[in-house]
Amino acid sequence: MDTHNSTAPFTSAHNFLAMDYRLLLPQLPPELRDLVYTQTVTEDNQATSTGLDFTSKVYDSSHTRVEITPVHHGHPALLALQQYHFLEGDEYRHFILTNAIQLRIHVLFKGHTNTFVQEHWDKKMTAHLKNLVKRYPWLRKVTNYNVRILWKPVSWAPSKKKRRLGAIAKRMVEVLTQEIDEDLRVRRGVVKACFRVADFVVCDHILRGQALGLGEFVWDLEEGNAREQVREVGIARDSRGFRGAAEAGAYMPSKFRAVPKRTTTTKLHGWEHQEEYVRSFRRDVQWDQEEVFGVSEEAEAPTQRATLAVAEEISAFGEARSQR
């Protein structure tokens, strides 16, 4: 458990009076206060952006829409102590910023591979992230990232190039998580990434006998780059059909502005999602622990063939990689 130096505000009674602070736990040392704060951070609490400097940041471009939302599972009542001038309120906020923030990042990939230039996207997004971290330095201390990439192009054109879709998604995750403090990444880093592909895209590739290259997204990980890494691939089903995709925004899940409760019975890393989604493959790699991966058995007609095809492609890539 990481602790911070909370002793400075307690140096003298004169300082307390000058800052007009009130004390809730004056007899507890900093280490025990941190322990109390730790017990209040639980998945039973609704995810919220209360007490944070910003609730959401959106970067929109011709090919992607990226939304970054910081949330935590802390207790809003303790954060509210700040407005009543309790010192523990400030301490608790500092604890949350240092230890309990999760960055939820949703990427809507609304373009297609014929015109997407990875280097240009990397450069622009890197600049955006550096500016964001400069404004909110505590973002460097965030070690829990949950990234969702959803590819549903607003207009469909078969790929003219041998672009590996998995490599594009893999690179997006790398760019979006590059600001994590290197030391914290190794000791506490958790990077969970889910790549969802529209059902009509998957079916078109299957009919044309083309591979999506999703194995690169799942298997090409830098071992030890984070304490835990999860890669998940699935198919996003659009019940309205492709004709209903006139606007890219229609494909966006909930905006996570106020981070409401989940809107479906399926619980995936605490995310809300309004669309139908079938998981094809999941891989969980934890430092010094046995690796876990598996093919989904959730597939149902008419997406069963596509789901199994995606899983087989990923599995085949992994087997070929292990034989190198």
Image (cartoon, rainbow, N blue to C red):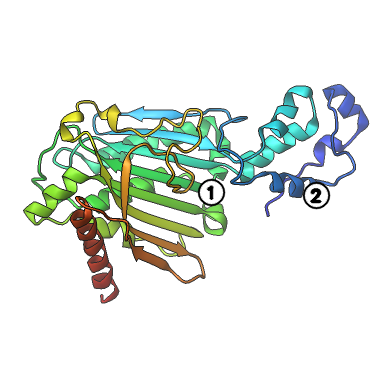
Residue 324, position as x, y percentages in the image: 25, 75
* Tally of marks: 2
Is residue 2 positioned above or below 53 on the image? Answer: below
- The residue at the point 44 percent across, 39 percent down is 272
Q: Which mark is residue 311?
A: none
Dot label at residue 32: 2
User: At x 41% / y 30%, what residue is drawn?
Assistant: 255
In terms of secondary structure, where does tag 1 sit?
A: loop
**Type of residue at label 2?**
Leu
Q: Mark 2 and mark 1 in contact (Cβ < 8 Å)?
A: no
Q: CA distance from mark 1 to mark 2?
A: 23 Å
User: Residue 181: percent from the left, percent from the top?
Assistant: 53, 48
Label 1: which residue? 143
Who is closer to the viewer here, 206 or 140?
206
Q: Nearer the viewer, mark 1 or mark 2?
A: 2
Disc 2 element: helix
Look at label 1 and name its amino acid. Answer: Thr
Quadrant position of residue 211: bottom left
